[in-house]
Image (cartoon, coloured by chain):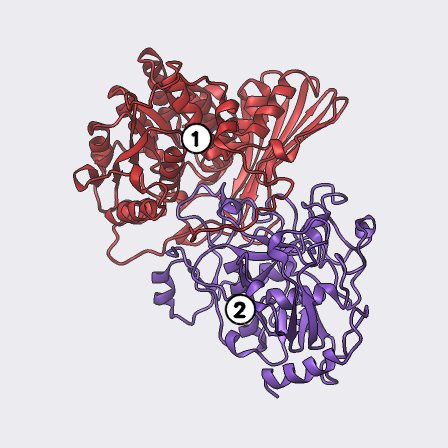
Amino acid sequence: MDFEKIVCVTVALGLGMAPAVSGRAADPPADMKPYAETIPGTSVTFEMVPVAGGTFRMGSPASEAGRSEDEGPQHEVALGPFWIGKLEVTWREYDKFWLDMSVVQASYTSEIKAAGVDALTRPTPPYADESFGFGKGKQPVISVGHHAAMEYARWLSRKTGKVYRLPTEAEWEYACRAGATNAYSFGDDPATLGDYAWSAGNSDGQPRPVGGKKPNAWGLFDMHGNAAEWVLDLHQKDAYKARAGKPALGPVVLPTEHTYPHVVRGGSWDHDAPTLRCAARMASRGEWNRRDPQRPQSIWWLTDATFVGFRLVRPLEEQKDLVGLRSRVTKDSP
Amino acid sequence: MSHADDAPTVPSRRDFLKTSTAAAVATGFVRVPGAWAAGSDAIRVGLIGCGGRGTGAAENVLSAAPGVKLVAMGDAFKDRLEASRAELLKNPKLASLIDVTPERSFVGLDAFQKVIASDVDYIILATPPGFRPEHLQAAVAAGKNIFAEKPLAVDGPGIRSVLETYEQAKAKNLAVMGGTQRRHSNGYIETMKRVHDGAIGDLQAARCYWNQGALWNKPRQAEWSDLEWQMRNWLYFTWLSGDHIVEQHIHNLDVVNWAMNAHPAKALGLGGRQVRTGPEWGHIFDHFTVDYEYPSGAHLLSMCRQMPGTEGRVGEDLQGTLGACATSQDAKRYIITGKNEWRLSPDQVGVDPYVQEHTDLIASIRAGKPLNELKTVAESTLTAIMGRMSAYTGQSVTWEQALNSQQALVPPSGQLAWGPMPVPPVAEPGKTELV
């Protein structure tokens, strides 16, 4: 079954359902089970949760408290099924990638060409403790750039033989909502946020080990808060306007060779409640690396974004425009 | 770098970006109205050392104040100079401030002399630190204001030279900045103000850390001479970098000296080369632990390590009779606990300290009250050198022994030539002599 067929089926399913039902929109296909995968050659595991394809309303209504203009207009989105990380990617996992000496260290176009354009690349080291003072282990990986997150996914895909990648912005919001149409996956009242999320209100100024709060209805932890999460998309303020009127099938604004602005979702341990909403969109900026004293600045690490990490998805069937997608960012990027 | 970005800004609690207005206020210097509006005191910058940090410093100075131009560049290597110029020109905001003609681009081991001799009045010294004392001496002799990256030397003779240069710079009313940017970071300034005002009482002990993974390494190319290979991998040769305790950990040692208003009297250090043992890593150590003793009797435990996969920590902790203080530049964490609890509000963290140090230096030049940090940063550099000497030899080392050391690690530039350069043996505590 290819992507379009899956979407057709799921759109039909989704449209046939009563709207705004909290919980699962539909069951995932029978052959999609939750699973734990061990990164080959290591003892480090991570867990993936299946998500049925379906439709949802992306964005926030104009009436939602704390929203920004770029969250509208709300529009129908249809997605195929995928697995998504139950947890944010931790340092335990990321260390296996960035300290993998079998992978070349490369940042420039020329270095990548010399290594072979298809070569996996790993981060050049920062002139700093890479945890930026916040500890490692089961903490979410933080301070990593969009390019680094994409290269991690490519490395993991090569290691496992499965397609892992960043979620599209639409997949992320669909998974965050887990069927809910409210500001948060648990409702509209931020008073309950502390049960589900680490935010500036309760984190005591630091990221926390993943999975420490309640999950959403689909069993996903820390979608709100802890590390804010990279998605694939380049940020466009008016991206939703073009989608109004008809269901958008697997919408995505593909990343380019530019180092920013990319979309970050979910808010973080260092953000206040409105930024943690399901529909809230943050856009990365050059300032996120402003204290990197080297030029060119690192494309791997962000000195001033100790709040940003990521989680991965694995599509059941990859949508066509994402097949073979990889980061085009290098230190030569414009 | 990116195309136009009209994205909404959602500041995290510690991501408030201060404007240049705030920068001017933070420096405490009052601008003379119109002083440079007419271009009368334009600052012409010459960059010596066009690596990643030198290029960064050039961008920082161009962003630090109006009326600044980059007009000359020098590096030992042509490819480094060209890459640096191309990188700077990539930034559309800066391109109009860069006027480095081929006639003012200098390559070779004597490039520093040519930059100093060109029509510049503000020199950035960002070569490997082993060269710093000679470059500082030459720039002050020529009457230039200077931004010198830390550390300022790698050995006792180098420090003595820098202290002489300090006196000459003072006599000539020149401004010289030392590259320990924490001294220009609002977080540290606010914290130290409180520490000096007695918020944690009398300082009894301190700890400081720069534990991280490995840094970059440039694989040796067949056409490189020994000297070229060492200079391109300068971190790993003590004559060029001072070892990582001097090159990197100086930042944290400097903070503790600042807090103590003193430099240590003595050091007893351990260290070795445990993980980074291959020839590509030169002959430096990969870890040090040093017990420093200050004249007050207070001790400082200092740790630095460059080993991939190990637990990282960069910061400083102070213990006083009334409380404690913890600082971390990376985490933007500035906390006092105990009797006078205080925490820097994240929105007070302020501007980029790498820009701020140039803002402060330029403001001091324009106000006719030149800052001169040479002595302070020379003392912090010697603090680190003293620790290294102790760890290399296995003996305790006093301040006087370090300062008066006869071990000159750096050949004068006139004696350097592209060609053979043997790698010194790895230091062996108990065998390596204290010279």
**One can see residue A299 in this view:** yes
Residue A200 lies left or right of residue B277; in this view the side is right
> Is B2 rendered above or below residue B255?
below
> Which hue is chain A drawn in?
purple
Q: Secondary structure at mark 2?
A: helix
Which residue is more in the foreground, A171 or B345? A171
Numbered mark located on residue A58 in the image? none
Residue A259 image offset from top left, x and y in percent: 46, 55
> Is B209 rendered above or below residue A298?
above
Which residue is more in the foreground, B139 or A200? A200
The chain carrying label 1 is B
The chain carrying label 2 is A
Q: Decide: few, some or many residues near mark 1? Use Cα within 10 Å; few <14, some 14-19, many ≥20.
A: many
Residue A201 image offset from top left, x and y in percent: 75, 43
Q: Which residue is mark 2?
A: A155
- Residue located at (35% from left, 66% from top): A113
Q: Secondary structure at mark 1?
A: loop
**One can see residue B293 in this view:** no
Residue A282 image offset from top left, x and y in percent: 60, 53
Residue A59 lies left or right of residue A155; in this view the side is right
- Residue located at (59% from left, 73% from top): A250
Numbered mark located on residue B179 in the image? 1
Q: Quadrant of residue A141?
A: bottom right
> Is A80 rendered above or below residue B256?
below
Q: Decide: few, some or many residues near mark 2? Use Cα within 10 Å; few <14, some 14-19, many ≥20.
A: many
